Image (spheres, helix red, strand yellow):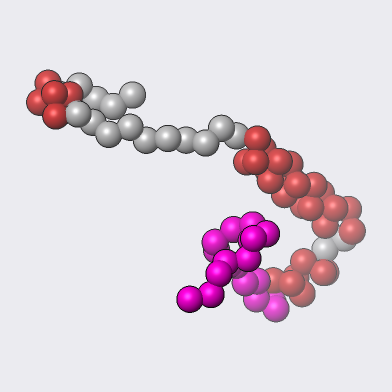
Amino acid sequence: MKEPAKNAAADFAYEIPDERLLAYSALPIIDRLRWLDEIRQFTLAVRAAPAATARRQTDGERESGESLR
């Protein structure tokens, strides 16, 4: 089995069709820069967000009808 790359950033892939790339290249430069900056801000916000954790409901909580918080 092949070892994953040590610098692998994510375990998913995303492909953009040629048509979308052509449509993007047809946009005015200001719109492309605005779009790029929005993606940069989103990426920074996601990286800075705390990791969400899930807590399992205990049998006692399930029987009493208490919900997860």
Along the viewing direction, whichever of 9 and 28 lies nearer the viewer: 9
Picture coordinates of residue 26 (x, y %)?
83, 69
Helix, strand or loop: magenta stretch? loop
The residue that appears at 65% across and 71% down in the rendered structure is 16
Picture coordinates of residue 38 (x, y %)?
74, 46
Please indicate, yes or no, whether residue 59 appears anywhere in the rendered image.
Answer: yes
Side of 13 where 29 appears, left or right? right
Quarter holding residue 23: bottom right
The residue that appears at 27% across and 34% down in the rendered structure is 56
Quarter holding residue 5: bottom right
Residue at the farthest bottom position? 18
Please indicate, yes or no, whether residue 31 appears anywhere in the rendered image.
Answer: no
Side of 14 where 60 appears, left or right? left
Picture coordinates of residue 2 (x, y %)?
53, 75
Q: Does 56 appear above or below 63?
A: below
Q: Does 46 appear above or below 26?
A: above
Q: Which residues are magenta?
A: 1-19
Quarter placement of the C terminus: top left
All told, the count of numbered labels is 0
Quarter holding residue 53: top left
